[in-house]
Amino acid sequence: MAQSRFNDDITAKAYQDLLLPLIFNPWGRLLIGKAGLKSGDQVLDVATGPGTLARLVSETLGSESRVVGVDSSPQMLAQAKAKPPIVNGADLSYLEAPAETLPFPGAHFDAIVCQQGLQFFSDQLGALKEMRRVLKPGGRLALALWRDETAMTFFVAIHDALEGTLDDALQRAALGWLDKSHLQDLLAGAGFSDPVVTEETLTVTLERGLPQALECAMGTTSGFAIRAMNAEERARFERKVSENLDPWKKGQAILAPARALVAVAIT
């Protein structure tokens, strides 16, 4: 079976260079706005990837704060650590660790953020319990995850094209999608008080259209499989991506909507 995950350097770099500014930075800014962060906060970014949200938090809070990013992918963390320091930003560091076993004492952080990570965790309740454990009393959690496997229309177009091209295409990467009620129940079960879950929509704008979409595809969990295609498979894949994105084409550009659940809770 074709294999691909974020634990490969080329995929990690494409993710950082292409997907971050187009997709994840806008969602990160939305999540920061929901998190109620303030100067002086000690903040943990769970599933930090290449440090996207951690860096945005550092820029937002300034030098009186401290931000730590954790992720289970050493390749993603290598991308995060290679980025230049943030001038006048919060102290920023990274550790390799799974969300289900956070390497911190209890009641250590004022706030935790988690962007598009929860759906990938093998033990979602365990991860949320760990987040609550390391939060101080009254600490705040803000997280976002795609509404379901169809909510990120750009990613759906890529994965459907892959499945229509390769007989042994990688299954969709997420382990567990959640609806609003299930997410609220998980947060409550982990011990958080009065979790509030809303559904938000943003638009992914690909101004250069299909060529830009194909470049971005290299930063998804399908990137390795796409690079391994022969010429015939690659041509068929590109045709299918174009067809799948037809509903979102506006002239040359592609305007693909994305829906995410955003949850805010306190200890």
Image: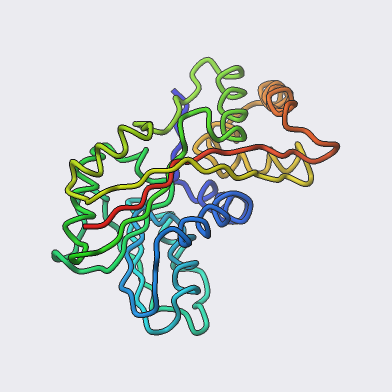
Give the camera-side residue of 244 and 112. Answer: 112
Pinpoint residue 200: horizontal percent, then vertical percent: 52, 43
Give the camera-side residue of 68 and 188. Answer: 188
Q: Quadrant of the N terminus?
A: top left
Q: Quadrant of the C terminus?
A: bottom left
At 41% across and 78% down in the image, what residue appears? 90
Locate residue 105: give its quadrant: bottom left
Instruction: Give the residue furthest to the front.
Output: 194
Horizontal side, residue 23 vs residue 7: left or right: right
At 53% across and 37% down in the image, what residue appears? 224
Classify 54 as above or below 252. Answer: below
Horizontal side, residue 12 vs residue 233: left or right: left
Pinpoint residue 137: horizontal percent, then vertical percent: 18, 65
Pinpoint residue 169: horizontal percent, then vertical percent: 50, 22
Classify 237 as above or below 118. Answer: above
Q: How many marks?
A: 0
Instruction: Give the residue furthest to the left.
Output: 106
Pinpoint residue 4: horizontal percent, then vertical percent: 46, 35
Q: How is the image coloured?
A: rainbow
Give the camera-side residue of 148 and 72. Answer: 148
At 44% across and 24% down in the image, what residue appears? 171
- The answer to whether residue 7 is visible is no
Give the camera-side residue of 265 and 154. Answer: 265
Horizontal side, residue 241 vs residue 96: left or right: right
- The answer to whether residue 8 is visible is yes
Locate residue 266: give its quadrant: bottom left
Locate residue 225: give its quadrant: top right
